[in-house]
Amino acid sequence: MTQGRILLGEHKGVYLLKFVGDVRVNLCVTMDTCLREVLDQKNFCSALVDLSETDGIDSTALGLLARLSLETKRRYGAVPTLVSTRGDITRILETMGFDDIFNLVDEPLECPSQLGERPLMECCEEDARQRVLDAHRTLMALNDDNRSRFQDLVTTLEQAPPISAVS
């Protein structure tokens, strides 16, 4: 699997986020920051997430995408679209309940070449732990299956002492 990358573009307030390669916890700060910035844009109308070139995606990334959908609905009354052309990824999305919070599309996009890559952001371990915790809480809130699937992980992360910064 290839290192994950995040590409971003915008057209008339619709933000296209394309995730390429292996999208894992190491991208959580970059992804979370990018999603928050997109949601805060004055011209934001909705989001389109393209996973057609995603090789793998973990639960942290899924939790961040779920938050994007929930926030888009809460703030703007819109349901984002998520493109998944790979059966294995689509099965994960459906298992997590994403068909309830996204418009799922299985056809590839005609992708504009104006997408810019987001640079990978560094973070401290405590910041990453908090983002992983928040992402999994979001997934747990989607349905009972997710709640039981991630409860042990969330409990463990909640009970772990904060990671102090090393100087």
Image: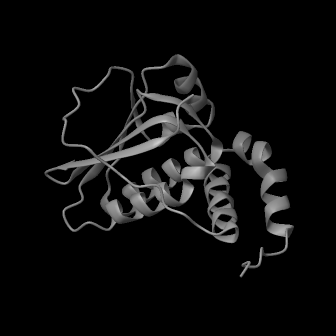
In the image, is residue 73 above or below residue 81?
Answer: below
Q: Nearer the viewer, residue 108 or 124?
A: 124
Q: Name the residue located 25 percent from the left edge and 43 percent from the top edge.
A: 115
**Quadrant of the image containing the N terminus:** top right
Give residue 83's quadrant in the image.
top left
Where's residue 73, x and y in %? Answer: 38, 55
Q: Residue furthest left?
A: 12
Classify residue 16 by image quadrant. Answer: top left
Which quadrant: the C terminus? bottom right
Q: Is residue 43 above or below residue 46?
A: below
In depth, the one of 66 and 89 nearer the eye is: 89
- Height in image: 96 above or below 154? above
Protein image colouring: one colour
Does residue 113 appear left or right of residue 103 in this picture?
left
Q: Residue shown at 84%/74% (left/top)?
A: 161
From the viewer's perspective, is 166 left or right of 55? right
Please identify the residue farthest to the bottom as the structure is shown: 167
Percent across and percent down for residue 38 are: 33, 60
Could you say where residue 162 lies in the image, as x and y percent from the top left?
Answer: 78, 75
**Residue 158 in the image: x percent, y percent?**
80, 67
Left or right of residue 54, residue 77 in this image = left
86 with respect to 18 (left or right): right
Count of numbered labels shown in the rendering: 0
Closer to the camera in the image, 37 or 76: 37
